[in-house]
Image (spheres, helix red, strand yellow):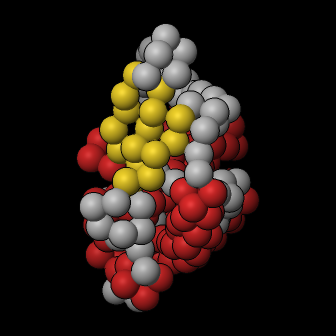
Amino acid sequence: MPRKEGVTKRISTQVVPVAGMTKSVELELLQVMKKLGIVRAESYNKLGSINHWGLDWKKAYPEVRSFRTPESLGLPSKLMEWTVSDVAKAITAQQAACTEAVVKRIYKRFSGTYNQKRRKELCRQLKTLAFLENPLLHRFVRKEYQRGHSWVKNQIVYQQGGYTCKQLSRNTYQLELAGLRRGKRNKVIV
């Protein structure tokens, strides 16, 4: 297999202190966090299994919506969709990391030119669910795959339409975030 060139892009989150927020906005954001935590946990349980290996993140929301609707939690559909998409993308990244680690183990275990055919066959099986039939590959995947762990507790995912940002002064900004009620925005000063 050819080596991948380039540098891995690092994504970082900037944490800023909140300068001003009303008590009602704080309570609503805590409520949203709690409800989205339920969505995140159930999404990880459903989509993180081997049965959903290689699922496209765009098809994840209908899959989750089949057993948990946003109305059952009192959430806006968009907030739930953005959270499920975020979970699905994280699971896809975990699966890609697992696949890469398993390929390294295959190359380490079956080194040399005389094992080239065997290596290619195992790597080909790894791209589909056929690896479940192969005990060696199945064992490698189960050992490398960190199923269902998000390490995220209270994250609200907003995409472009879910918030607006205004600069109030040189170092102060006002975020207007979508809330639980349609049309009402929660104002946070950072």
Residue 107 visible in the current orientation: no
Residue 180: x %, y % from top left: 42, 68
Q: In the drawing, does residue 90 fall left or right of residue 76? A: right
Residue 123: x %, y % from top left: 47, 49
Work out whether 190 lies above or below 158.
above
Work out whether 122 lies above or below 189.
below
Residue at left 27%, top 47%?
161
* Viewer-side residue, 101 vs 17: 17
* Viewer-side residue, 55 vs 151: 151
- Extreme top residue here? 170
On the image, which quarter does residue 75 sit in?
Answer: bottom left
Residue 107: x %, y % from top left: 61, 38
Work out whether 54 lies above or below 31.
above
User: Can you say which quadrant of the picture contains the C terminus?
Assistant: top right
Q: How many marks?
A: 0
Residue 17 visible in the current orientation: yes
Residue at left 59%, top 45%?
21
On the image, which quarter does residue 149 sit in?
Answer: bottom right
Q: In the drawing, does residue 155 fall left or right of residue 65? A: right
* Viewer-side residue, 27 vs 109: 27
Work out whether 7 lies above or below 138.
above
Residue 115: x %, y % from top left: 56, 41
* Viewer-side residue, 135 vs 66: 66
Q: In the drawing, does residue 9 fall left or right of residue 67? A: right
User: Can you say which quadrant of the picture contains the N terminus?
Assistant: top left
Residue at left 55%, top 73%?
35
Residue at left 43%, top 88%?
72
